[in-house]
Image (cartoon, helix red, strand yellow):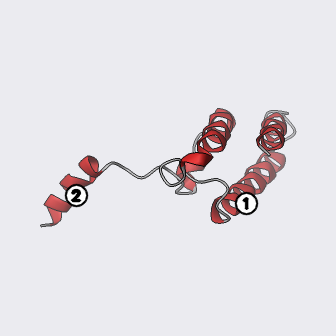
């Protein structure tokens, strides 16, 4: 599955950078966003902190998507959870 998924992402990258116009860029972004959200909700594309067996898929996906849509992961709130040490000051500030 990884090989096919990587090919799809590469095609999306080429379409985004083809110079065909804003409407194609928006269509590619929306379609890729929908596929990523579906994969995440289905448990295929999850952070390695949640499922170590998905680490290769997660890393390859974001390595490639970040090249042409660097904000997509944060826009979809699929960032890996922050460490507890980073969250501690927030808890203390609310106390």
Q: Quadrant of the C terminus?
A: bottom left
Residue drawn at point x = 64 percent, y = 65 percent? 41
Q: Quadrant of residue 8?
A: top right
Q: Identify whether 14 is placed above or below 84.
A: above
Residue 91 at x, y percent in the picture: 20, 61
> In terms of depth relative to the viewer, which is nearer, 82 or 14?
82
Q: Are circles 2 and 1 on residues that touch, CB within 8 Å? A: no
Is 63 displayed left or right of 93 in the figure?
right
Q: Earlier in the sequence, mark 2 or mark 1?
A: 1
Q: Quadrant of residue 90?
A: bottom left
Would residue 69 be seen by someone viewing this image from the given angle? no
- Secondary element under disc 1, as helix, strand or loop, is helix
Residue at x-position 52% and y-position 57%: 77
Pick whichever, 76 or 5, lies toward us: 5
Pointer 2: what residue? 90
Left/right placement of residue 95 relative to residue 36 reads: left
User: In the displayed structure, does residue 48 sit left or right of residue 44?
Assistant: left
- Location of residue 34 in the rendering, given as x and y in whole percent from the top left corner: 73, 60
Residue at the limit of the structure toward the front, as seen here: 53
Residue 29 pos. (x, y %)? 73, 50
Residue 86: horizontal and vertical position, in percent? 27, 48
Label 2 SS? helix
What residue sits 68% from the left and 65% below the top?
A: 42
Lateral position of residue 67 relative to residue 77, left or right: right
Where does label 1 land, which residue? Answer: 34
**Disc 2 crowd, CA 10 A, few/some/many (<14, 14-19, 20+):** few
């Amino acid at each position: 599955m990884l090989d096919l998924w990587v090919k799809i992402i590469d095609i999306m990258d080429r379409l985004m950078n083809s110079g065909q116009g804003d409407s194609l860029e928006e269509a590619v972004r929306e379609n890729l966003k929908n596929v990523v959200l579906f994969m995440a909700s289905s448990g295929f594309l999850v952070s390695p902190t949640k499922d170590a067996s998905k680490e290769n898929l997660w890393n390859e996906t974001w390595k490639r998507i970040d090249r042409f849509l660097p904000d997509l992961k944060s826009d979809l709130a699929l960032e890996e959870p922050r460490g507890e040490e980073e969250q501690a000051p927030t808890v203390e500030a609310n106390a």
